[in-house]
Amino acid sequence: MKPHPIHRRQFLSRLTLGASAPLLGPLLEQIAGAAEGELPPLRFLFVVEGNSLPPLQIHPEGIPFVERENRNKFSDTPLASLKLPVSLQPVEAYRDRLTIVQGLSGRMCTGGHSSDHGTLGCYAANNGRNVLGATVDGVLGTKFPGVFRNVVLGISSNLTKPVDFNLSASGPGRSLATLYDPKIAYSRLFGSVADGKARGEFVARQNILDHMRGDIKKAQRELGGIEKVKLDTYLESFESLGTRSSRLIELHDKIKDVAPTLDDKFSSLEPTDQLDAHFAMATASLIGGLSHCATIASGVGFPNMNVTFGGLGITRHKHILGHALYSQDDPTAWVECEKIRAFHFGLIARTMDALGKVPEGDGTMLDRTVIVYLSDGAETHHSRCFEWPMVILGHGGGRLIKGGHYLQYPDYGIPGHRTMNTMFNTLLHAAGAPRDDFGNLDPTLDVAMHRGPLAEMLA
Amino acid sequence: MPAHAVPQTGLPAFLEKHCESCHNPKKTKGKVDLSEMVNSSGKTDSELLIMMLDVLKGGDMPPEDEPQPSAGEKAVALDALNVLLLSSAAAPGRGNLVDHKTLFTEPTVRRAATPARLWRMSPHIFMQYANGLTRSRMMNTDGGREGGDGMHPAFAYMTPLHTFRDAAGIHLFEDATSELLFDACWEVAGRQLSEKGKGMKPKAIRAILMANPPTPQMWTDAIQTQFDLTIRREANAEEVSGLMALGEKTLKDTEVVTAVQTVLATILLRPDAVYRYEIGRGVPDALGRVRLADEEVARAISFALTDSGPDKEMLAALKAGELAKNEGVLAQVNRLLNDKVSQPRMVRFFQEYFEYPRVVEVFKDKSYPTFILAEQRITDADRLVTYILDEDRAVLRRLLTEDKLFAISDGGLGNAFFKSVVQKSYLPDYDIPSDWDWKGSQPVKPAVGRRSGMLTNPVWLLTFSDNEKNQAIQRGRWIYMKLLGGNIPDTPIGVDAVLPEAPHKTLRERMEVTRLEYCWRCHQHMDPLGLPLEQFNDFGRWRDTEVGKPVVTTGEIDIGDPALDGPVQDPYEMMTRLAASERVEQVFTRHVFRYLLGRNETPDDAPTLIDAHRAYSKAGGSFRALVASILTSDSFLLRTR
């Protein structure tokens, strides 16, 4: 059913908002905006792969690799005449949208096997113990929510672990859940399009949500302010679950069109299958407007990182590979890591293909999407975060540089050096939520190195 | 780290006079800038406060060649810092910020109590509860020793590393976990109705499932049954009619079974089903404290000692009004403590205190985790704990000095593969000969070297090791925090906390980099406590050489207690001295308190701690006496609003 066109003011005035009003405000603004024919916000997909990204694995052939210590000045090399490394070859077709960024540091993070929430948050998360603030995807999801503010999916070495709290956060102490089990994720995202008994269940669950709100409010009255935060939060959760559930019903037709087919991959215990399913769901979520910010956590944090990519014919888990990478006499570890990375970029390319087929504004959805790839383990297995290689795909509706660049920033601490904070400032500028300060500072660097967007990245 | 506004005290003036000339935005000596605190407008964090308290107390600051504050000035500044720190001390892992001496000094007025609270069910409790309701093993704790893995993620522990996992203050159901909880309760309700599961479904449930449509009486009976099983009380008329309306509304779109599932799941999701209510009831005393309602007492004791709600005897005591008096509470506590039913939760205290279940996360690239036999090591350590707990004498002392250990204590060597792994990797780490005759009784004394309690047990040593070396610093940190009651801030941001690679050097030699003034401020508290354990390698094996050199095991205790302080020659001397210390016993008491109360101690809890420590000593180091004392204390039984 096509919704009737409706003006924003009318739409908002018709709603009576409960405790969830502050949470839902931006979402309602957008629903109203869409009704007026406005373009949705930029889409973001963050792909974080555990166990580090050695700078050389995203270094193209055709220019010499400069070790970090010898990088004296900023350089911007066109990718046009260079050969992409094995890891990036799956996105060859998108090389004009590709920017490789070397040399940003992130020493305000914990480093080691993983910087956990610090990876996208720029702070010392201390093995996920200290969630000091919102991560960049959390900020984007809160500012530009779809039905879901964020969709965070991932895989772990523990293939039956259904969920973890290991990467994204919406605020201090508020880690977002990373859904590992593709079936749970599917039912959460696309359950409303089910038929028959499953459909009845969806209605039943909706009824529980309605009833629960009354129960919690009654408990609040009876307890008269004792543990107010716990009960308020519980109520807020049910309010937002209820609203989300109603929205999923309203969007039924649209979601039905984009929902991936629930095939064997969703119940597989093979990491490659699970990752494949998660990318399919993230892509469908972005296309269907379920969220404008999706995050894939591929073995993020310790010990989740110890994934064995058996589906690629690799028999060692990534922790062992990480150690073997140090060893000069074990070139197979390097090749295996490249293979795993290329697999990720293959899935990224598939997402880009899908987005590129959906018209939006004067172009396609792909034109208004930014994909960010990095590792929570920064540059090496036991990372120290003096550099943090990254790959950006997409120009975000022309707000970022078009692509086809190899950017290399000067070494840690020397003039022109920049930190991870500036990359996230850049993304927030592009998204239309500009920030010049994000996360914490590295006390040994000039404040200016953390501030503002990367001028070289903005169009 | 939470930031705290700096109150108007004598502190800013002190800082301006004695500190700011070096620690200002321009100089930031030692990377510390105190200007915001001086202006008293800014905020600071507890890490910085700990460091300041530390250097001021220890006389490290101001430096010797600078003008020194008078004793009075210093006392004012220390008091102000302590006040600031108390607000941080409630956070898990920060309990030691409360001054130890204050906690063991009898106050003028005994005012111990806990604020009225809702305590989220723990994953272990939820597991028991879900399994009971569904008459199945819907969930199990396999692999769930740390972090709630293996149990339902709606109840994930969000507590920091090194702390007790179940902290009442920090766990709540927010957006992400509420959705998971919803799924879990929906599933439990579904399984309650399914044909799977042992035994018969309750009568009311069977009746309603066979009806179409159910009568109001059937709805009432099913609702009352679910209340009885979950909330442990009768539903009132309003609750019944509301839930019945929900069931009937749902029935319009679904079959009976789904409508019943809807009602049962809704009851499971009630705030009083997912949170333990500890509100208290009655007229407040002169200090504003009320006693827990009797049914709250029954649940609180049951959950403190087991993962299940009140059992039959407890319910009988509740009905007889016995729980209104401390004697009645004590009788129930002692009954449970003397029963095996309390053993798992008591052993879990020691697991979380010593942290040895984290051994499953240790990575060794040359010996894959399966060959470390991490789970086996945990089982063997659990056996040592239960062995000592069963005798219940000098419990802490023995845990620090026991020279015997358990190895493959749960049976034979099984298949040939397991046998070969045990002989090759396991027994040598326990210093037991590979050809050991398995018929011998356990615990055993190792054939080589010497052990002294849990900190020299291969499981603990392996837990505090990394890929290629001992974690001497982390070991020292553990001893400093958990036996001596000291504080170590987290590694400051920007510090490159990596020891130099030097294959020909001993760890002690590699650790010399921590002697730099900036590092040593914290490392002086950790390194000398961790280094005596260099007596063992990073798999826990006793050794007398390291990289071809005789192993050096010297260290030092320095906590400001004459009975403890001074150099030690080896881990044995260190453990013996620690085990004999009253302070160490008291710090241990503080940890037991945290585990049982689900919160950190405050100065008001001093009477509880004093009594508990006294009970422990008087009973010859009885852990049961210690627990019983805490569970009958005002801190445990009284609430403030």
Image (cartoon, rainbow, N blue to C red):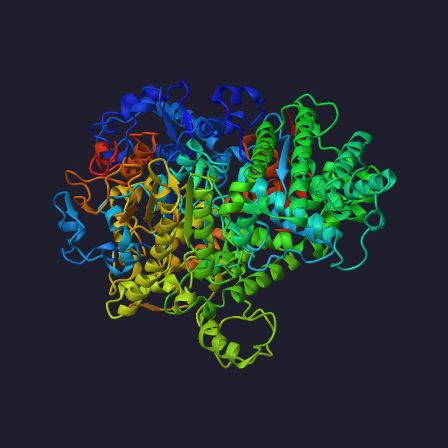
Question: What residue is shown at x 48% (from left), y 34% (from top)?
Answer: B89
- Compared across the picture, whether A400 is left or right of B82 comes to left
- Residue B620 visible in image: no
Could you say which is closer to the camera, residue B582 or residue B551? B551
| Residue B28 against residue B417 in the figure, above or below | above
Could you say which is closer to the camera, residue B34 or residue B629? B34
Q: Quadrant of residue B364?
A: bottom left
- Where residue B55 sits in the image (x, y, percent)? 33, 35
- Residue B501 visible in image: yes
Point out the image quarter for the N terminus of chain B.
Answer: top left
| Residue B85 against residue B348 in the figure, above or below | above
| Residue A192 against residue A335 in the figure, above or below | above
Could you say which is closer to the camera, residue B60 or residue B45? B45
- Compared across the picture, whether B315 is left or right of A199 comes to right
- Where residue A121 sits in the image (x, y, percent)? 36, 39
Q: Quadrant of residue B107?
A: top right
- Where residue B261 sits in the image (x, y, percent)? 73, 45
Q: How many marks?
A: 0
- Where residue A187 sits in the image (x, y, percent)? 57, 48
| Residue A245 against residue B144 in the figure, above or below | above
Question: What residue is shown at x 57% (from left), y 29% (from top)?
Answer: A229
- Compared across the picture, whether B493 is left or right of B159 comes to left
Question: What residue is shown at x 49% (from left), y 71% (from top)?
Answer: B446
Could you say which is closer to the camera, residue A214 or residue A406? A406
